[in-house]
Image (tube, rainbow, N blue to C red):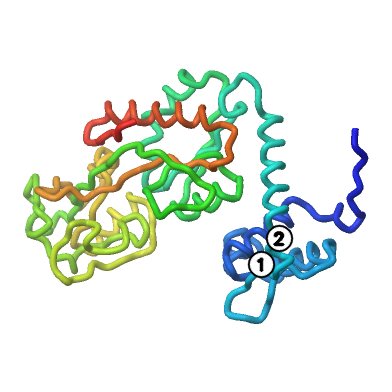
Amino acid sequence: MQRSMISMALSSVSLRDLALVQAVAREGSFNSAARAMYISPSGLSHQVQKVEQALGMPLFERGGRRVVPTTSGQRLLGYIEAVLGAAEHLEHAARAGDVAFGSELRLGVPSTLGPYLLPHFIEPFPQRFPGARLTISEGKPRGLLRRLQEGELDAVLAPPSATITGLDSTALFFEPYELLLQAGHALAGRSAIALTELDAADATLMAESHGNGVSDLGMPGAARPERIQDLSIESLATLVALRGGYTLVPILAHDRLGSIPNVVLAAVEGARPGRHIALYWRSATPWRDDLARFGDLLRELAGTIPGLDAAAS
């Protein structure tokens, strides 16, 4: 066995310290990295300085509008990435065996999807992957994908986004939206309503879950709907019940929303606004084959759930 030649200074550096350095390089800002890693900016700065002192050189140029790696820092960041990757593989190897996902799948699911999709695959999952435990984390898609990149999660269900370095994905299904209107809305008695019949200014939409613009939802005209911070679908429905107007909700939530007072549901006539859902994982994961089988399971289930359109495998 080779004897370790790591200095005392470097041996005091933790994997968490290296992950913080990696976050600063990725975000280009100490403040942004601190928010992403759930640490105070001063605490982050202290830990990065600790790594720099252990390595004997500065890793970042400070003082500009964007923090950038020094020439030496850029070279060492490659080694830091390799160390963190090796640590992840060590963890997976410790969990590994004949059981899928090394005995546990840590899955991130958007909070606007999880409560409605999870009941459909909680039972089939142990049948398809005996001995594997499913651990669920809910949140916003961007935050979940960040946690996936950082190794906190093994996979994430999220709408497709721009190419993310270090992540692979496979399409799962399309989920249409339906309209949710306050019961007093002029069109509330209709079973189906075209978006062209509605005033976009009366809509209440969530900033992240409903896409980036009116065109994403097939809404005509120049009017802009009100954008609010993401919240649960039930809370969004309650907000419409209190304030009036309407919103768009995923069809999987239909049964739960039907019991909320002072709102009604209607199908969208003509255009089909909705969201595509994909399964994401790290490109270097040792569980690629297991995740491919998990994706197959979700597509199979989507094909049996009314309203969903399963993607081709």
Image position of 246 with respect to 221: above or below: above
Tell me which corner region of the image, top left, top right, bottom left or bottom right, holds residue 304.
top left
User: Of the residues shown, which amino acid type is indicated by label 2?
Assistant: Arg
Q: Position of residue 220 (x, y in %)?
A: 13, 63
Tell me which corner region of the image, top left, top right, bottom left or bottom right, holds residue 8.
bottom right
The residue positioned 18% from the left and 71% from the top of the image is 223
The residue positioned 51% from the left and 28% from the top of the image is 289
Q: Comparing marks 2 and 1, which lies closer to the viewer? A: 2
Residue 33 is left or right of residue 251, and the answer is right
Spatial separation of the CA atoms under disc 2 and disc 1: 27 Å
Label 1 residue SS: loop
Label 2 residue SS: helix
The residue positioned 20% from the left and 62% from the top of the image is 244
Image position of 33 with respect to 100: above or below: below
User: Of the residues shown, which amino acid type is indicated by label 1?
Assistant: Ser
Along the line of sight, the residue nearer the viewer: 27 or 207: 27
Residue 309 is left or right of residue 296, and the answer is left
The crowding category of the residue bearing disc 1, from other C-alpha atoms within 10 Å (few below 14, some 14 to 19, many at least 20), is some
The crowding category of the residue bearing disc 2, from other C-alpha atoms within 10 Å (few below 14, some 14 to 19, many at least 20), is few
Residue 175 is left or right of residue 132, and the answer is left
Residue 1: image tag: none
| Upstream in sequence: badge 2 or badge 1 | 1
> Does residue 287 appear in the picture of this structure?
yes
Image position of 88 with respect to 45: above or below: above
Image quadrant where one finds the N terminus: top right
Along the line of sight, the residue nearer the viewer: 207 or 160: 160
Tell me which corner region of the image, top left, top right, bottom left or bottom right, holds residue 276.
top left
Q: Which residue is mark 2?
A: 75
Q: Which residue is mark 1?
A: 40
Q: Position of residue 296 (x, y in %)?
A: 39, 28
Image quadrant where one finds the C terminus: top left
> Does residue 241 appear in the picture of this structure?
no
